[in-house]
Amino acid sequence: MENGKLKFILASASPRRKELIGHLRIPFEIITLNVPEESEETAPVKFALEIAALKGTAVFNKLRAENPEASYFVVSSDTIVCHNGKIYGKPRDRNEAKDYLLSLSDRTHSVFTAVAVKFVHQGQVDEFSFVEESRVTFNNITDALMERYLDTGDSLDKAGAYGIQGPSLTFISRVEGDYANVVGFPLSRFVKESESFLRMKFPQEVSWLNLF
């Protein structure tokens, strides 16, 4: 470990995940690679886990090739919206965004976020992953409200064609579960999982946050 510290790498360009990880008040670096987000999995949980792992593994392998002696804690994530077994990713355009929102209007859907962590220290590689689910209910989205929301452009870079922390709050009536999970990263669950994992690796450390 350089200066006795692990290198925390966030393998995501999402400004929302950057902001959430920033709440930990630890140093981290953002590194991303252009990895095709494709999977043959149709089950939502398995799909999200596979995509999250693909993103993180690509960055992890690149870092290890560049500096095999360093210690890395690479975190990657994928968020999907699911209703009646159908996965709603990021819409390709305004028309698809509208179709997504119409399908979710006046209904309750699930938001799954998969988090994958790949870790290496002193040549020993390990990993863990988990999936968090939240439930979101929309009111009926009227035509006028739909057009005003689509005009904001907020829907185009988000799974399910909406971001909970933006103007979509005009039609979101209820959230069950972790709000941050719907934003794109289940921070409190990540804290618990990381603490449990790193305490096994470094039992002498008072707080896992001090490792970074």
Image (cartoon, helix red, strand yellow):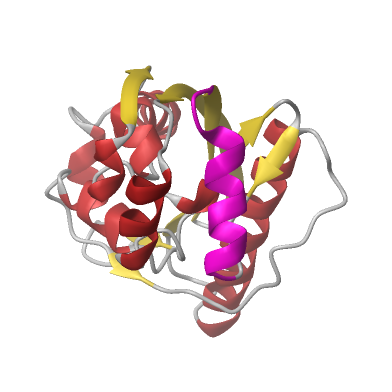
Residue 81 visible in rendering: no
On whether residue 96 falls in the magenta region, the answer is yes
For the point 83% across and 40% down, which residue is it? 42
Determine which quarter of the picture holds residue 87: top right
Image coordinates for residue 170, horizontal then vertical, percent: 25, 38
Stretch in magenta: 93-107
Residue 159, image x, y percentages: 52, 51
Q: Residue furthest top?
A: 176
Name which residue lies at 77% across and 61% down.
Answer: 38
- What residue appears at the point 31 percent right and 44 percent down from the top-left corner? 168
Magenta part mainly helix, strand or loop? Answer: helix
User: Would you say residue 113 is visible in this rendering?
Assistant: yes
Q: Nearer the viewer, residue 182 or 63?
A: 182
Q: Is residue 38 above or below residue 178?
A: below
- Along the line of sight, the residue nearer the viewer: 99 or 175: 99
The location of residue 176, given as percent across then percent down, is 38, 15
